[in-house]
Image (cartoon, helix red, strand yellow):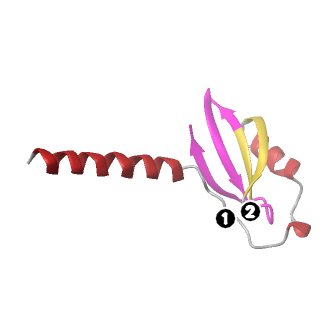
Amino acid sequence: MRVIRSVVYAVSVLWLMGSAALADGYKNCTKVDKASWKPASEAEAKAKAAGYEVRRSKIEGSCYEVYGVKEGKLYELFYSPEDLSLKHTVAK
């Protein structure tokens, strides 16, 4: 019984660690090539207009990932570079 409990515990811990690693890795926003992407500065401007204090931004997969603070909380905002639509938000 003790062995089964240990195995179940180990599997649970590994599963939780794996899901946490994938939680903020949103990377698929568009299939359009980079030549037709809008500038990253426009994604930052859109986040500012939504009330975020933008800290930085980067390209993550086929998304613009904008790091912003709103009401004291850090957020990751994922914008499609094709049309600058907000695809995903992660609160940290």
Residue range in magenta is 68-92
Residue at 77% from the left image edge and 36% from the top image edge: 54
Type of residue at label 1? Asn
**Between 10 and 45, the one nearer to me in the picture:** 10
Which residue sits at x=45%, y=52%? Answer: 19
The amino acid pointed to by label 2 is: Ser
In depth, the one of 84 and 20 nearer the eye is 20
Q: Which residue is mark 2?
A: 62
Quadrant of image for the C terminus: top right
Decide: marks 2, 1 in contact (CB < 8 A)?
yes
Q: Which mark, by number, is residue 28? A: 1
- The residue depicted at 43 percent of the width and 46 percent of the height is 17
Residue 77 belongs to the span the image colors magenta = yes
Left/right of residue 58 with respect to residue 8 in the rendered view: right
Q: Is residue 26 magenta?
A: no
Of residue 73 and residue 21, the one placed in the foreground of this image is 21
User: Residue 36: percent from the left, percent from the top?
Assistant: 89, 69
Measuring from the top left, give residue 77's x and y in whole percent.
Answer: 67, 48
